[in-house]
Image (tube, rainbow, N blue to C red):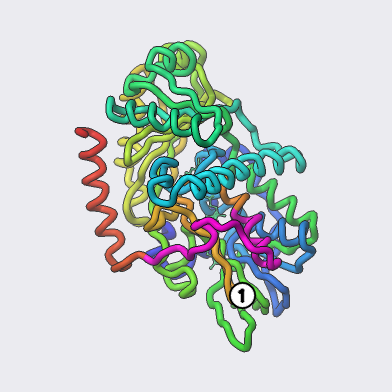
């Protein structure tokens, strides 16, 4: 039974998905699960990037006693099954929109955090020699229609003028000569510093870093109940209990539906779907017009994202089903294949070797939030872009646990707003998909 955060009770007894990534690693056999009662200063729920790195920074920077509780195996959640794009950004707001909403100082502050996030991931990979198949740098954002072309041009100029980044605008010809002959592209914005990694190898690398610090990572240890009494937290699992002064909820989109008032109804879990082709030969690559391994996304509301993997398979992702129950319906993979062939018609006869889905956490205000008060905190709402930002969020969460004030930015100072009429989130999502499909196609 596929775990659905709005339907299922708990995300326990689930295996890694049958993804391309899980075919690239040996499944670790040794797992420690929680047994009996243990006491720690900080308990972290969720063994993905956010949870593991929060533990890493708490232990390495502040020597704070902590542990991680993971319902399944590390990497079960989005961290072990995403597309592996390490990007300067999170949420869904562009920098011009942020400028309109909050002004230039805040926009620059958020940009600095997103930039630090990419640097942080790179540094962690480097310092801890994490073998996660880092690919060539560069992030291409493809304009899917003439209006998006003009908007991207304006975005490139805004970023270069105000944020000092290396943003280049590419015409369709420049794009096809130097990167890809994408039949759906009108031009592209290229940022110099995004890159691709194997996300499962990355999260396993984070787990090793945390374990080396002596922090317990309990797997197959789903928190079924969180009780707060006498200024203490009790986290109950099937076979044990953690008593902690503070708790960090890092279950992100995999957080169960009624977990804690801290996070309940503050996100909408959305399925993203990925297909991976067979390895492409050099003639297939040249027929398709694919000459870059740089990470690529388009400007649609219902975005497609893609990149060539180190073994020249093409990874292609986009939206999946609305509910977990329908996630395995082949129509979603078939829709992705059609979209892939619209961009690269020469791939129409290519086999799809892998097809899997995962949950991302959408925020009502389109931005991630890191929040910590009265002994309980979270980082949530990455809206599908958390590979890089989770590292910065974890660093900031650890700072806030240690009592260091966080930068005066809305992503750190305000809790994630709750969804109004939360029980109708899926209805609204369905309506949005219809609207977005029409907008992407006709406007
Ligand atoms: C298909 C897909 C493609 C994506 N592509 C990209 C990309 O290319 N770039 C990018 O930046 N982002 C991408 N994302 C988003 C990114 O993967 C996430 O933002 C990020 O991995 C979130 O990490 P996390 O540690 O916060 O949560 P997760 O990795 O989801 O970890 C949460 C963990 O908490 C555990 N958990 C939940 N409840 C409990 C409980 N009660 N007790 C114990 N454990 C619990 C779960 O088992 C899970 O393992 C993608 C996501 C998906 C699904």
Please provide percent x and percent y for residue 347.
38, 21
- Residue toward you, 279 or 322: 322
Asked which quadrant contains residue 155, the reply is top left
Q: How many marks?
A: 1
Asked which quadrant contains residue 318, the reply is top left
Region rendered in magenta: 393-418
Q: Quadrant of the N terminus?
A: bottom left
* Local secondary structure at mark 1: loop
Residue drawn where x is 23% and y is 39% of the image: 439
Please provide percent x and percent y for residue 436.
26, 43
Residue 130, placed above or below residue 221: above
Residue drawn where x is 32% and y is 53% of the image: 322
Residue drawn where x is 58% and y is 60% of the image: 72
- Residue toward you, 36 or 109: 109
Look at mark 1 in the image and give the residue it sits on: 375
**Horizontally, is 265 left or right of 311 in the view?**
left
Please provide percent x and percent y for residue 96.
41, 40
Q: Report crowding for label 1: few under 14, some 14 to 19, many 20 or more residues within 10 A (C-alpha).
A: some
Q: Quadrant of the C terminus?
A: top left
Residue 18, placed above or below residue 244: above
**Horizontally, is 219 left or right of 440 in the view?**
right
Q: Check the image and name the residue furthest to the bottom.
A: 230
Please provide percent x and percent y for residue 95.
44, 41
């Amino acid at each position: 039974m596929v775990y659905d955060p709005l339907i299922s009770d708990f995300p326990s007894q689930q295996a890694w998905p049958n993804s391309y990534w899980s075919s690239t690693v040996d499944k670790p056999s040794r797992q420690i699960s929680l047994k009996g009662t243990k006491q720690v200063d900080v308990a972290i729920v969720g063994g993905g990037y956010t949870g593991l790195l929060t533990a890493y920074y708490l232990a390495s920077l502040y020597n704070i006693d902590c542990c991680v509780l993971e319902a399944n195996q590390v990497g079960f959640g989005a961290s072990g099954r995403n597309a592996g794009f390490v990007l300067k950004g999170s949420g869904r707001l562009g920098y011009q929109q942020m400028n309109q909403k909050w002004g230039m100082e805040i926009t620059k502050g958020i940009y600095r955090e997103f930039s630090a996030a990419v640097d942080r991931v790179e540094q962690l990979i480097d310092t801890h020699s994490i073998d996660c198949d880092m690919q060539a740098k560069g992030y291409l954002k493809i304009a899917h229609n003439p209006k998006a072309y003009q908007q991207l041009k304006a975005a490139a100029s805004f970023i270069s003028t105000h944020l000092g980044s290396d943003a280049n605008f590419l015409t369709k010809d420049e794009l096809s000569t130097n990167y890809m002959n994408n039949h759906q592209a009108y031009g592209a914005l290229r940022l110099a510093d995004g890159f691709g990694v194997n996300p499962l190898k990355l999260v396993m690398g984070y787990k090793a870093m945390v374990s080396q610090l002596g922090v317990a990572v309990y797997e197959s240890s789903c928190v079924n109940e969180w009780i707060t009494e006498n200024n203490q937290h009790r986290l109950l699992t099937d076979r044990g209990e953690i008593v902690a002064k503070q708790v960090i909820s890092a279950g992100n989109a995999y957080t169960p539906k009624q977990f804690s008032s801290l996070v309940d109804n503050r996100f909408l879990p959305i399925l993203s779907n990925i297909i991976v082709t067979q390895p492409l030969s050099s003639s297939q690559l040249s027929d398709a017009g694919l000459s870059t391994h740089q990470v690529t996304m388009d400007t649609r509301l219902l975005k497609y994202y893609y990149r060539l993997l180190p073994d020249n398979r093409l990874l292609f992702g986009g939206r999946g089903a609305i509910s977990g129950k329908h996630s395995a319906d082949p129509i979603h993979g078939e829709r992705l294949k059609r979209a892939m062939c619209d961009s690269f018609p020469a791939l129409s006869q290519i086999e799809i070797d892998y097809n899997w889905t995962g949950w991302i956490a959408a925020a009502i205000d389109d931005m991630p939030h890191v929040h910590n008060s009265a002994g309980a905190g979270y980082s949530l709402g990455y809206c599908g872009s958390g590979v890089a930002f989770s590292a910065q969020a974890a660093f900031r969460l650890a700072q806030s646990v240690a009592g260091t004030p966080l930068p005066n930015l809305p992503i750190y100072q305000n809790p994630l707003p709750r969804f109004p009429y939360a029980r109708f989130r899926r209805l609204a999502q369905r309506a949005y998909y219809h609207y977005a499909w029409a907008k992407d196609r006709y406007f």
